Every structure is written in structure tokens, then in C-alpha cells.
Amino acid sequence: MILFVDDETARSARWREAVAERWTVEHLDSVEKALAAFGDSQKMQEVLLVVLDLAMYTAPPMTDKETDLGRLTGDALRKRLRASGWKGPIIVLTNSRDDIIRQSVERDGDTFTRKPETVPSAFVEVVRGRLHS
């Protein structure tokens, strides 16, 4: 299963639909649901790959390092997932042009992709590459 985490359901639909033609996809539309899923070791054993949006709204505030004006970043979720010991591939799919985050994601061996440049058909190839690497 490929786990998509994006609070803007309509905006990520094209990428989810493209991937769903080849793999089972589960979509989580909130930070809270993602944190619950990441804490469920049985569920995470079923996950082949995680796709995270970069910025999502969250109700409870987190630490200053993880938030920006009440938003928990996909990067903070990515770091929490890695800290939990999950070793599978992670793709950050975002509109952000933040090179510092991109460098951090790539330095950790994860993939940083931008929605405007990565059309759904190209995204399928990114997913395929990460699943077979």
C-alpha cells in the first residue's frame, strides 16, 4: 500500500489516482490521522511507500521547530516517521520551492518532488523508481 498524507484532498487527487492504477492507495487528510497511522506498527508493515505534503494544518500546536504559524510540515512528519524506525521510501510531494528542506530531505535519502513540475504520469515513474531501488 502507498500511504498519501495531504490535507488538501482535491489538490492531490490527480497524483493519488495515477498511482492507484498500479498500487493500493490510502489517503489520510490530517496530521492527526498520519501521526496515529505512524504509531500503528501493524499498519506501517503494510505500507510500501509514504507520500507527504509539505505543509498541513494541525489543531494542537507542536514544538516551534515543527510548526510555522500552526502548521506541521510534511518534513516534520517525515522526521517523526524516521525516528519511529520505519525504513521504507518517503516522497515529499509539494508546491514548495524551499531548497533548505529539499536538501534535508535528499540528504536523508528521501525524495523531494514539486507538484507543478511532476505531472501525475511522471510521478508514477518516481514511485516506481523508489519501490524498486
Image: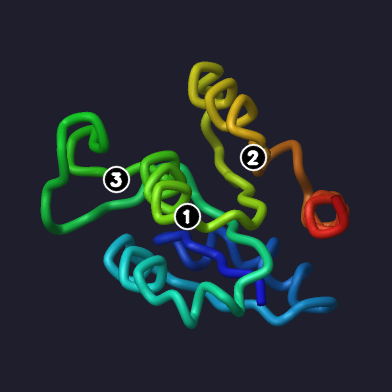
Q: Residues within 10 Å of mark 2 (few under 14, many from 20)?
A: some
Which of pointers 2 and 1 indicates the residue nearer the eye? 1
The spot of residue 17 in percent (x, y) is 71, 73
Left or right of 45 in this view: 126: right
Q: Name the residue: 52% across, 53% down.
A: 52
The spot of residue 38 in percent (x, y) is 40, 66
Q: Say which residue label 2 marks.
A: 110
The spot of residue 74 in percent (x, y) is 43, 46
Q: Say which of 32 and 107 sits in front.
A: 107
The spot of residue 68 in percent (x, y) is 24, 33
The tag on residue 96 is none
**Which three-letter amino acid code belongs to the residue tagged 1?**
Gly
Q: Say which residue label 1 marks.
A: 85
Asked if marks 2 and 1 touch (Cβ < 8 Å), the reply is no
- Give me the C-alpha separation between circle 2 and circle 1: 14 Å
Which of pointers 3 and 1 indicates the residue nearer the eye? 1
Q: Say which residue label 3 marks.
A: 72
25 w.r.t. 91: above or below? below
- Give me the C-alpha separation between circle 2 and circle 3: 18 Å
Which corner quadrant of the image does residue 33 belong to? bottom left
